[in-house]
């Protein structure tokens, strides 16, 4: 998503008559594509803004209201919301691979997540617009096309849901492959799984974040499924697509996560046997529901849990 956003920001700047500078130091305008998902990333933004005090700075991407209010104190800073460039076509259409956003935002309000506060509620692009973009990319030789969205399998435009969209794109002419991310387990319907089995252009890969293997923690995260539901979902998918590679996201050290609850995550990881996992140590994001909870798992314990899962996943990968 960040790569796609950066391409579209560049497209918008070019439409406005701007030309790229060889180095940031020689630029009159500096655009920073921001991600507020983790504190370390937003800390780098504050440092960069301080370094460019003599230039006009535009902050785009995902920025929490809390950080936006603080950064607005800099007189040289202005802001672009993702809606300002979300529907722009890609920067150029002669690449071998391309990202195609089909929806943005999120309605789920997971208690740890900043996305609903930075990108807003879910918005889906019209199916016809997406079809035309894929046709154009295929015509210009693009071989790998990834459909992207914060919660892509909740896509819906009039009567077209994500399963129907996949089938339509699969039937388009051209020599290209399709993939997509990121999916939410609660929206992984039987209709969508069936569509995946019938779409020959789709790569046999699925990114399906689980976040935790403990039901109480999942409830506190507002994920709206159980560990048992998730494991049954994986079994169902692998039964229909045996060669599929499944990756996931996991958060360790969520507020109140006990050692026993973490062990439940370890058990789920062993049971599912993921091909890859992106593991994050919990950090509170201002404005989210989880930020009101006491962050009572120590940094050392978060690191221990992270290392244990990382070692476990690496064994599966090899």
Image: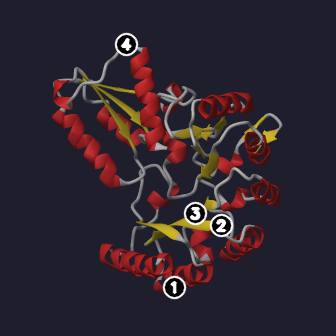
User: Mark 4, residues whose alpha carbon is within 10 Å: few (<14), some, or many (≥20)?
Assistant: few
Is tag 1's residue or tag 2's residue first in the polypeptide sequence? 2
Asked if disc 2 and disc 3 are in contact, CB closer than 8 Å, the reply is no
Of the two numbered discs 3 and 1 on the same chain, state the one appearing first in sequence: 3
Q: Which is more toward the observer, 298 or 262?
A: 262
**Labelled pair 1, 4 in contact (Cβ < 8 Å):** no
Mark 1 or 4 closer to N-term?
Answer: 4
Instruction: Give the foreground label among 2 and 4.
Output: 2
Taking 292 as reference, is 165 left or right? right
Label 3 vs 4, first from the N-terminus: 4
Query: Distance of mark 2 from mark 3, alpha carbons?
Result: 15 Å
Q: Which residue is mark 4?
A: 17
At label 2, counting other C-alpha atoms closer than 10 Å, the crowd grade (few under 14, some 14-19, many 20 or more) is some
Instruction: Give the CA distance from mark 3 to mark 1.
Output: 18 Å
Nearest to N terminus: mark 2 or mark 3: 3
Foreground mark, 1 or 4, reads 4
Q: Residue at x 52, y 46 (%)?
A: 115
**Residue 296 coordinates in the image, percent (x, y):** 39, 73
> Residue 203, relative to residue 30: is it above or below?
below
Q: Nearest to the eye among marks 3 and 1: give it.
A: 3
Per the model, the C-alpha gap separating discs 2 and 4 is 45 Å
Tag 1 residue: 263
How far separated are the C-alphas under marks 1 and 4? Answer: 55 Å
Residue 141 in which image quadrant: top right
- Residue plotted at (80% across, 34% down): 158
Q: Which residue is mark 3?
A: 209
Residue located beneath label 2 in the image? 244
User: Tag 2, which secondary structure?
Assistant: loop
Residue at the top extreme? 17
- Relative to the observer, which residue lies in front, 32 or 177? 177
């Amino acid at each position: 998503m960040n790569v796609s956003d950066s391409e579209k920001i560049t497209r918008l700047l070019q439409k406005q008559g701007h030309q790229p500078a060889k180095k940031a130091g020689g630029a009159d305008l500096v655009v920073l594509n921001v991600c507020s998902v983790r504190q370390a990333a937003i800390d780098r933004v504050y440092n960069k803004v301080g370094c460019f005090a003599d230039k006009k700075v535009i902050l785009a991407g995902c920025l929490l209201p809390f950080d936006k209010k603080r950064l607005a104190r800099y007189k040289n800073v202005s802001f672009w919301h993702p809606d300002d460039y979300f529907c722009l076509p890609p920067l150029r259409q002669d690449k071998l691979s391309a990202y195609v956003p089909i929806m943005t935002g999120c309605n789920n309000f997971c208690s740890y997540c900043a996305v609903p506060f930075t990108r807003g509620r879910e918005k889906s692009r019209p199916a016809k617009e997406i079809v035309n973009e894929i046709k154009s990319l295929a015509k210009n030789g693009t071989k790998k096309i990834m459909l992207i969205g914060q919660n892509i399998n909740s896509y819906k435009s009039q009567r077209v849901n994500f399963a129907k969209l996949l089938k339509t794109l699969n039937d388009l002419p051209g020599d290209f492959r399709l993939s997509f991310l990121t999916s939410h387990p609660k929206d992984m319907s039987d209709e969508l799984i069936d569509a995946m089995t019938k779409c020959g252009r789709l790569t046999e890969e699925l990114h399906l974040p689980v976040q935790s293997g403990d039901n109480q923690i999942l409830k506190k995260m507002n994920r709206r499924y159980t560990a048992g539901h998730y494991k049954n979902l994986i079994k169902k998918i692998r039964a229909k697509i045996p060669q599929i590679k499944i990756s996931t996201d996991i958060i360790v050290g969520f507020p109140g996560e006990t050692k026993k609850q973490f062990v439940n995550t370890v058990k789920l990881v062993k049971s599912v046997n993921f091909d890859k996992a992106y593991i994050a140590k919990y950090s509170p994001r201002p404005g989210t529901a989880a930020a009101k909870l006491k962050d009572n798992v120590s940094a050392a314990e978060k690191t221990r849990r992270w290392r244990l899962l990382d070692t476990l996943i690496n064994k599966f990968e090899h």
